[in-house]
Image: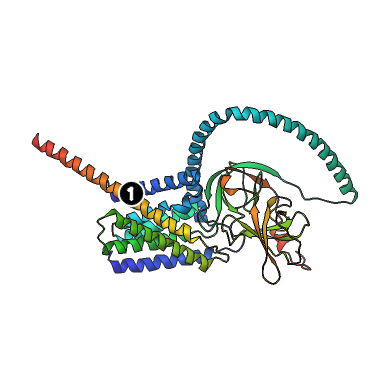
Amino acid sequence: MSGAVKLLLGIAAGLLVHLVGAHLFPDFPRLVDVFLIVVALHALSGNSLSGLLVGMAVGLLHDTLTGSRLYGLYGFADTIVGYGTARLAQRLVIQRATGVFVVVGLASVLQQVVLVGLTFLLLPDPGFPLPLWAGAKAVTCGLLGMMIYAAAGSFGRNYESRRRSRMSRLRLE
Amino acid sequence: MDERRTGWLLILVLAGQLVFLATRVPGRGGKGTALESAGLRLLGPVARLVALVSESFSGSRESLALRGRLIDENRALRQEVLDLRLRLLRTADLGDEMARLGAAVEYAAPPAGRIRAADVVYVDRSSLLRTLVLYAGPSPVRVNQPVLSPEGLVGRVVVVAGPYAKVQLITDRAAAVGAMLLRNRRQGVVRGSARDPGFGLELDYLPLQADVRAGDRIVTAGIDGIYPRGIPVGTVDSVEPGGQLFHRIHLTPAVDFGTLDQVYLLEHEPVPDTVKEALPGVRRR
């Protein structure tokens, strides 16, 4: 499957999870930012240009579903997150899923810091997000990112081993 | 593209976005962008589909469980309807009397306006800003149209895109509602709470000498040109001495925003901007 198709499927799945989650549990978007997870996991490939552009596009998509006064807040924050995560991934060799937990958790913290900074800079009456919710969001995003990364890795390995065994059988025949 | 060029592109993109954001910073009562409207048009149907599927699943499950309870409730409601009909007759009498007295002193009350129901297809309580998206159907919706629930005031429409409308909740920090104490008609401004963002409300500009007590009911005052008078907004939760001049009053909203699945759009004619902004002594040509 090509990278672009994987990315589009990831965004569509993220959008669906966000809408269903927000519909069933009103506090779901306060705890989990599926769009951020999509951006961070995509940026783990280490391509900073792609991380930047995908961060901006997914952030603007997220903006469409939130915020009445400042369209573009998430677009700005996710652009930085996408680029920053890609640059970090170029310098790190992530061998374990726990590494992904740390990277996605840090990405969530970075996104929330940028959002709070921008809101305080631009809006006349900004409100404080509770630090407990911000911390919980970083942890849940990290955990979900780690689980998706691990599941995708295991699926990829199984698919590859099945493909190899099929190829070897074909050669024997 | 090498990393240096990507770095420059990042700076360019961020600068562009900052300029865009800075130009979009609204004052109170700001409206959304064309890009946001286009996005809402695209994503609105998806959100509506999710809401419909989820409601049909939960609806069929609940209908089985609630059938027995509904029969009892139906009986009780029939009795209540009879009682209410009697009260309505008495109220109609009072209304006629009021109209006669009003006509005698040539009093012209503003029209009350009609309401129509709209489904909530998306609620955002996650960010610093509090909004929900409605599917209002083919009938037109206009910006600044008041949105109510049976319990009280929900907010006002800020963006319209085809059959979808985005509503700014009164718990948003930027929302401002002209309100008054029902007990003594003392007026102030209700805003989203800074202490409990997204959930609580505050009543500002009530001087220290004003008589306010916990439990006082707050309704719209009809002085902001958007909301008509008399819609429940909330109840006074606590009163603290604020700065030198005003009380610091925390309110509990009349509406439980976590349970909204359907709201009502009020067909209320707002005060025209030309009238609101007209200066005393200046004649229009």
The spot of residue A146 in percent (x, y) is: 33, 52
Determine the residue located farthest toward the left in the rendered image. Answer: A172
**Residue at image coords 77%, 66%:** B283
**Residue at image coords 72%, 56%:** B271
The spot of residue A112 in percent (x, y) is: 44, 61
Dot 1: element: helix
Q: Nearer the viewer, residue A64 or B232?
A: B232
Which residue corresponds to mark 1? A148
For label 1, count other residues whose C-alpha is less than 10 Å away and answer few (under 14), some (14-19) or many (20+): some
The spot of residue B161 in percent (x, y) is: 55, 49
Q: Nearer the viewer, residue A83 or A17?
A: A17
Q: Quadrant of residue A74?
A: bottom left
| Quarter that holds the N terminus of chain B | bottom left
Horizontal placement of B277 versus A131: left or right?
right
Horizontal placement of B99 versus B129: left or right?
right
Question: Relative to B201, does residue A25 appear above or below in the rendering?
Answer: above
The spot of residue B204 in percent (x, y) is: 68, 63
Q: Quadrant of residue B114?
A: top right
The residue under label 1 is which amino acid type?
Answer: Ile
Horizontal placement of B134 versus B267: left or right?
left
**Residue at image coords 76%, 31%:** B82
